[in-house]
Image (tube, rainbow, N blue to C red):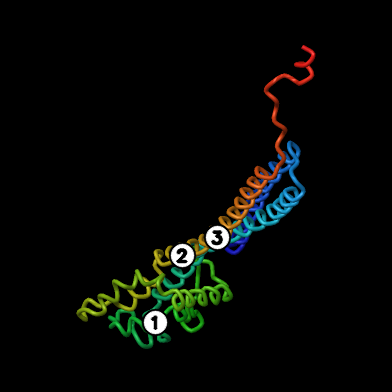
Amino acid sequence: MAFTSVVTSAKVGAVVGVLLGGAAAFVLIARVLREQGAAPGPVGVRRFASACCLVWALVLPLALASAGLVWGLARGLGNVVEGPLSTTVRSTTHAWLTRGSALHAGLLARYPLAKRLSESELVSVVRAAPAEILDANQAGVEVQDADGAALPPQAIDLVRDELRHLVGSHGAWVLPELERLRARAKGASGERPTLQETIEAMVAPSVFHDAATTIRGRAGRYVRFLALGALGLAALLAATLALAWRRLAPRPPARADGPPAGEGASG
């Protein structure tokens, strides 16, 4: 259902982009046809106008549809990261920590949950925790979602890989939550963060919110590039065509101020 919502959001964005691009192209082409009907210009100007109409008809719908598709994908992925992904990871982590005292694998083989971590230990936990938290087979924990339903192994594998990628490639997403723990890890031993505090900080809702915000912000740059680039090209062509039409279009003959020569001679 989560990935279906992403696809739906992408489709809606693409359709909206096509409609906006088609409407913009229709307005520009209709204006050109009206000007040509009122005062046909030289052959060169008419051919340039035809080329502009072709570019508008091709570029504007495609570019704005692409921008809408990217916007929809980013919006859908951001919602998935903040919603199902965040819920699944935190639910799994809660189950893992609840039964942690009975486990003797992975992280708990090295550090008990109440173990206070130094800075070097904190770094190793940050790098290793995502995969080991979600390794249900190793930990012997039946992974459940927020409603208590068992999650399929395929979903766990996907979430594990994505969380590992998040921490490994985009450490800045979890950095704000961990900076406070790093400062404590450098201080007195009695104030250092425990393993449980570290794991809970790594899967805090704010981490997934920052990740979703980053996804939307990065996609927003591509959307602005596509949309503004297409609209800028269309505006440049429209301005050039208007200038050419004004300079090269034939002007109507000027009217004479005095009476015709025949009337003056007969009088």
Q: Residues within 10 Å of mark 3 (few under 14, many from 20)?
A: some
Q: Give above or below for 242 relative to 230.
A: above
Nearer to us of marks 1 and 2 is 2
* Image position, residue 260 (x, y; %): 75, 20
Give the SS element for disc 1.
helix
The image's mark for residue 158 is none
Identify the image quadrant of the N terminus. Answer: bottom right
If you read the primary sequence from the N terminus, does the residue marked by circle 3 or circle 2 appear first? 2
If you read the primary sequence from the N terminus, does the residue marked by circle 1 or circle 2 appear first? 1
- 10 or 33, which is in the foreground? 33
- 267 or 37, which is in the foreground? 267
- 179 or 241, which is in the foreground? 241
Residue 171 visible in this rendered orientation of the protein: yes
The image's mark for residue 225 is 3
- 172 or 233, which is in the foreground? 233
* Image position, residue 10 (x, y; %): 61, 59
Q: Is residue 102 left or right of residue 2?
A: left
Residue at the spot of label 1 = 102
Q: Are marks 1 and 2 in contact (CB under 8 Å)?
A: no
Give the SS element for disc 3.
helix
Q: Residues within 10 Å of mark 1 (few under 14, many from 20)?
A: few
Q: Residues within 10 Å of mark 2 (few under 14, many from 20)?
A: some
